[in-house]
Image (cartoon, grey):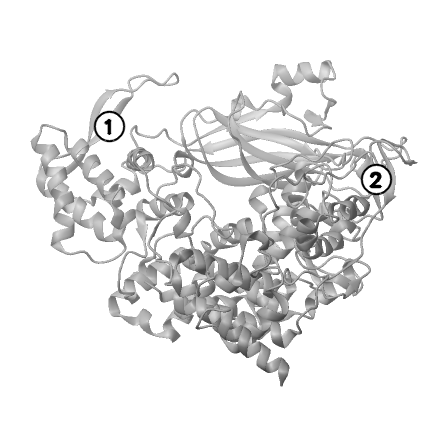
Amino acid sequence: MKCLSLIFVVTILIFPLGYSFEFAAFAEAHCIKCHGPEKQKGDLRLDTLGPPTAGVAEADAWSLIADAIETGDMPPRKEPQPDAVETEKAVDWVQAQLAAALEPIPGLRRMNREEYENTVHDLLGIDTPLAELLPEDSEVQGFDNVATGLGISSVLLEKYLDAADVAFEGVFRRIEPLEPSTRRAVLMEKKENQDSVAGKKGGVISVDGAFVDFTPGWPPARVDEAHPIEPGTYRCRIAVFPHDPGEHRTLTVAVFAGPLFGDGKRRFMGMFDATGTSENPRIIEFTSHLEAGHTLHVLPWVYPEHVTWRDKHEKRPGVGTLWVETHGPLDQDFPSQAQIDLFGESETLSLEEGASYYLRHRRGVLSHYIDSSAPREDLERMIRRLVPRAFRRPVDEELVQPFVDLALARLDAGNTFEQAARAGFVAVLCSPHFLMLHREPEVDDFEIASRLSYFLWSSMPDEELLALAEKGELSNPAVRRQQVDRMLQDPKRQRFVENFTGQWLDLREIDFTTPDKNLFPEYDELLMRSMLAETRGFFAHILDENLSVMNFIDSDFAVLNQRLAEHYGIPGIRGHEEFRLVELDEDSVRGGVLTQGSVLKVTANGTSTSPILRGIWILDRILGQPAPPPPPGVPAVEPDIRGAINIRDQLEKHREEESCARCHVRIDPPGFALEEFNAIGGHREWYRSLGEGERVGNIKSYRKGQPVQKGDQWPDGTSFADFRQFRAQLLDRPELIVRSLAEKMMVYGTGRPVTAADQAAVDTVVEETMKSGSGLVSLIHAVVESEFFYLP
């Protein structure tokens, strides 16, 4: 009775009115000692802190309090700990107060640059690069499509003007295309290639009239004669074969397209297994847009020798290339289809010859421009056709007329028809009605169509979505469900796969660092591109089959090619080109995303691994419990790659600081769980050292360092000895995993941050997802059907 009376007095005298009896008791038992009248650690004093409704500062403080209690950061480990029921009640009370105090963040936002490029491409039917013309977008809660990170400035508007102008130019084909022709480079007819063989430059030889290369470095064999002399779509063919591959090895070529010379950007076209013989080579074939003067670059991807441990008596493997050819241009429309789609077909429209156009390979070429014998009517018709498609909804006269007036004013001022059309077009594409999403105060069917399409396609709605919106059918949940399923079967869903995994799992950072060649000589571009393909293929398989999201923690399958299978120590897989579903042994350390090379690489720095970096990453991306930033002035902990000091000893010393220990008790355990894996995803029992340690076989670049530090314990005292035990413990917390992914899907799918005010919506999404078996598609459906998806 005395205890209850004391708590009642504390509630009345110390805490402001409005605090619950239960929370006051919790705070008195676990918080006031360090955050009360006598002491205010972190400048936080609970007994004078106003309720969340008092203002922004108070709401922010209570959000931090809820996070600290929920994640176990508070109270400190040396203090008495609340039980799970006490903690849940305290957190629920704070979150309920925050939900009542905080207004939902408005969803109005602009497109990010990827969405802009996709939208313009889908609107106009062009493939002109546009994203690179715009500045990079800021990230909020891990994604670059969130409203609070997508501001508008005068500088950005100027960039949009430039991008719209480039898009307008991309609509036209200015010169009449050449008739399709074939340009072929027979490699050993090229003098530069003959000289390379004669001088043994770069490890090349001639075999049966083929150029055989043994190394993957630049520059590749010269194939100048195959380059297009005019831009267009070309069918590309390459004849390759393996040279002395050995029984256990598959040889592969990487094909890039880009400038003949210099350091210009080259597009990766794919990796292809070299099969066949010099008499019957493999013919690689694909179709791609190529610019004039660009060519194909064919590089052999031969494993570094220490990966396959080539015996000194074994013949050296290489890739033979007989010839390379391009055929085209295949797109012969003149005028272009994009021009017809934009301006329509009319007897009053014509392509007129203009100034001479210099081409070295043909004379008398004239540039063309569009003109009209009824310019006012054609301008108005073009603008009225464009505006509703660009704005993704029907428009009234009041909205469309200013764009018409602008174009006509330019015409009246003496501009040509094309110049006036360009002005109207650029104005439409720079309008807030085009650039901004979630503009409408009421979420009608057209708004639903846009929200679905920017969620799953990162682009505008297609004709089917807009037709359903016109009929008012997208307000029907059953129709929405059918459309989500349809959209996830469309090729454009690959944008969702790449954009979501690229940001959730940080795959966009895969080549941010280059692994140290002395520590990781087996790393090459084939391995890096295989890593990306594995994770994207893994995510796509879970999506296609609506498998449980718990497969991201552990799965009995992987999506592998030979390069990755051998990197992971999984036998029996041949071929690098094809990624296939591989059943894993029951006791395999692989399975899920945490053991995939891509994730393990992006969470390392290229030289070493850090339990801190990886632990922070897991807390945020997998558990949804991000760690706070480190206190100011605290030096980073750098692993000792000389092999003298182990990382656990370094971190134990680091934890002696109380301000550091509070966070590291959460950060370090998941980080140490991943210490079994090196900076390029290989499983290990010891660290590689550039200094101390034993020699490793015939490897000269690194030594065997100290044993891996791989066990730890959670803040609640639960311990694990290795990654397998850690993974099993994560599997025992499905609601935590589903909740984390649900929050991230909600942020990505709506373009608005998830705050404390949205926790009830998150609860609903999690509940609906888990009722349906926690499938990935089920999660997407739950997000689409949540109230959060339809906030204004």
Residue 307, image x and y in percent? 80, 39
Residue type of the residue flagged with mark 1: His
586 over 672 or under it: above or below: below
Judging depth in this view, the residue of 95 and 282 nearest the camera is 95
The amino acid on which the numbered mark 2 sits, given as a three-letter code, is Ile
The tag on residue 203 is: none
Residue 714 placement (x, y as % from top left): 73, 62
Asked if labels 2 and 1 touch by Cβ distance under 8 angstroms, the answer is no
Where is the N terminus found, in terms of image quarters? bottom right
569 vs 548: above or below: above
Is any part of residue 527 visible from this angle?
A: yes
Which one is earlier in the sequence, the residue at label 1 or at label 2? 1
* In-front residue for pair 382/433: 433
Specify the label residue 645 is tagged with. Answer: 2
The answer to whether 313 appears left or right of 548 in the picture is right
In-image side of 709 versus 626 (left or right): right
- Rendered image: mark on residue 368: 1
Classify 280 as above or below 89. above
Residue 490 in sight: no
User: Where does the image place residue 22, in percent across and percent down from the top left?
Assistant: 55, 77
Task: Out of 149 and 472, give the one closest to the viewer.
Answer: 149
At label 1, counting other C-alpha atoms closer than 10 Å, the crowd grade (few under 14, some 14-19, many 20 or more) is: many
Q: Position of residue 301 (x, y in %)?
A: 69, 35
Q: Using the rendered view, name the quadrant where residue 275 is placed.
A: top right
Residue shown at the point (41%, 59%) measured from the top left: 750
Q: Is 538 in front, or is 205?
A: 538
Viewer-side label of 1, 2: 2
x 30%, y 33%: residue: 158
